[in-house]
Image (spheres, grey):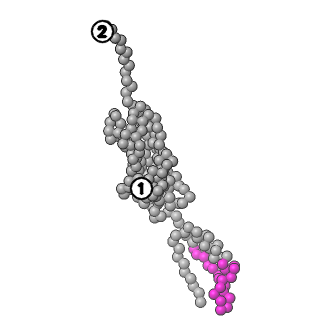
Amino acid sequence: GSLTRADFWLKRKQAPEGRVNVELQNAGNDNADEVSYTITLLGNGNVAIDNLSVMVMLPEGVTYKPGTMQVDGVSSGDPRIAGQSLSLSLADRSDDWRSDIRFDARINASVAGDLRTRALARFDSPIQAAQQTPVAETSMVREPSTSENTGYVLNLKFDVMSAQLSAADMAQLDALIESWNGVRDIQIASVGH
């Protein structure tokens, strides 16, 4: 037998098209010397993404807190650290996807002013290798803490020939200590006879 006629129907293949976006947010937490970061990566389209990594550039005086890196709610180990830069490799992706990266950082107590953090994603696709997203940036302003006091005068009264404080004196000292809770630079001068 032989083939005398064949019909072929052709359809144009959809061109590869995709997009990767980066969102960066920071938030304070209970400790004034720490900040939490969340990076959201959003991908859409019909393109496979390979060699995906995220890079974060922390401001001077801000350092990654070891053990806090999570990808999609799962601990992922610590990122590579080079100076103020963190980099983390992620699994390959395709189609529409979302990934949330979260970590904490410590802020040096002497750091104040405008603290800008930047992040970007790098990846390869069938369209082009070595691509990167635009840089996402977040900023926070840290004011130096100031606590100035003109001084406290404590009139502690000891009994004759005694070094024991009375209950009222102890309450006065406890109130002073409580009001200084969290203050780091304290100068104390004591005068007596």
**Badge 1 density bin: few <14, some 14–19, many ≥20, Cα 10 Å:** some
The residue sitting at 34% across, 33% down in the picture is 127
Q: Which residue is mark 1?
A: 59
* Res 100 label: none
Residue 165 visible: yes
Image position of 88 with respect to 63: above or below: above
Dot 1: element: loop
The residue sitting at 67% across, 80% down in the picture is 169
C-alpha distance separating marks 2 and 1: 75 Å
In the image, what residue type sits under mark 1?
A: Pro
Is residue 148 left or right of 160 when viewed as pictured? Answer: left
Give the foreground label among 2 and 1.
2
**Which is nearer the N-term, disc 2 or disc 1?**
2
Q: Is residue 104 magenta?
A: no
* Magenta span: 150-170
Q: Is residue 153 magenta?
A: yes
The residue sitting at 42% across, 56% down in the picture is 59
The residue sitting at 59% across, 89% down in the picture is 193
* Res 2 label: 2
Dot 2: element: loop
**41 and 4: which one is in front?**
4
